[in-house]
Amino acid sequence: MLDVERWAELRREHFVRGVGIKELVRRTGFSRNTIRAALRSDAPPSFCCGERPSKLEPFKDEIHRLLKDDPKLTGVRVRELIEPLGFDGGKTIVDDYLREIRPVFLKLRTHQRTVYRPGEICQWDLWEPSALVSVGHGQLRRCWVVVACMGYSRAGVGALIFSKEAPDVLWGMTRCLWSLGALPELMVWDREGCLHAGGGRPTEAYAAFCGQLPVDWLFCEPADPQAKGCVERLQGYLETNFEPGRRFANHLDFQLQLDAWFEKANARTHKTLRARPIDRLEEERALMRPLPEREPCLDRRWVVRVPPDPHLRFDTNDYSLDPNLVGRRVEVRVSQREIIAVALDTAELAARHERCFAKNRTITALEHARALRERRGARSDDEVVVEQRSLSVYDQLIA
């Protein structure tokens, strides 16, 4: 039987080069009828063998019934259920058939391709690095990165935080927005606990944040990461290309390296867009609303009375307060960078400390330590001197 290559050679020699059938018989050794059949056929030869019936054929109706009851039934379990009925085939033919037939019984979700207008949407997510980050004093701490991605330009930014509480997450969002340089119309989050109050409603802190800017918000449905696929893909790229092979001296070094990585990533040519995100971000900024003059106030605030042991506890650390204000009430403000305490009645500065992200530390300002020493000295001078009699006086009384 002729294969495709021999069939093509015979037709070339006869029709192109003018070689006769008799000469082709002599050259190839094929019979005259074989050569004539090849010359008459306009289609290449095909070799179709009749399909042998599969061992699975008698059991397909039962497999369909099983999948109708449970479309996610595994191949191993299907084989176990049809073996008592007489099936003695292998695992491969069951798996191959299930791979073809299972989509008929599953309600597969379809996705449409979305195109975003410039400045229309910014997607957000939290990424947790696999390694702990150094925060000084020989300590390592768990951290997260607030990741933002613009829908039109795919430009991304990130901010390092040390808790998933609302003030820290919102501070990370603020840093990202100021890095992007303008405000999007809509901000999309999944149902993050500190931002989502339930039923698609924002928490009070998140609503206040969006109202100050102002921007619109949207929460994705549960278990629906596809709804914010831009930031999910950026986060996957971040996991595989930023963290591996890097060392970080501390959290400040982590943020510096993260900013440099995003700057480089935004300047690369995006595979889908066929453009650089940094260039498309310039288009977006021209159409987006400008940032407000001031960043939203996200400091933690509360009022406390200065205790006899003049220290303030926050995030397991003790920060010293002015001992001269013991017993008076002070307002405490905690930001990402510092901790400030001010007396309510006189507005005196009770404390100003750089925030420490290490745990279980006591931070004492030099002026507070000196004030404590002076107060101890003053008390020792004012103490009443008690007379101490000689023991011989008591001996005389006893005698």
Image: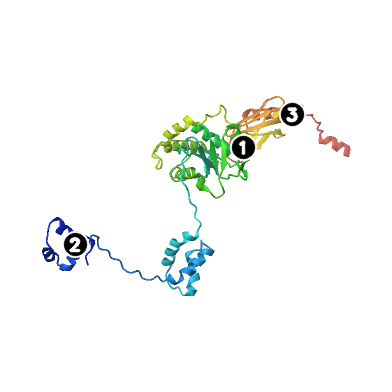
- The residue nearer to you, when weighing 313 against 114, is 114
Figure check: 112 above or below 209? below
Kind of residue indicated by mark 1: Ala
Tell me where residue 12 appears, x and y as whole percent.
Answer: 17, 57
On residue 310, the disc is none
Figure check: 92 above or below 340? below
Q: How crowded is mark 1: few (under 14 residues within 10 Å), some or many (20 or more)?
A: some
Kindly indicate the quadrant of the structure image that contains residue 95: bottom left
Q: Is residue 196 left or right of residue 309?
A: left
Identify the element where label 2 is drawn: helix
Figure check: 286 above or below 196? above
Kindly indicate the quadrant of the structure image that contains residue 15: bottom left
Kind of residue indicated by mark 2: Leu
The residue tagged 1 is: 207
First reached walking from the N terminus: tag 3 or tag 1:
1
User: Which residue lies at the image location 48% right of the left edge and 51% below the top edge?
Assistant: 110
CA–CA distance in space, label 3 to label 2: 121 Å
Pair 2/1: label in front? 2
Kind of residue indicated by mark 3: Arg
The residue tagged 3 is: 379
Q: Is residue 191 left or right of residue 56?
A: right
Q: How crowded is mark 2: few (under 14 residues within 10 Å), some or many (20 or more)?
A: some
Q: Do the residues labelled 3 and 2 touch (CB within 8 Å)?
A: no
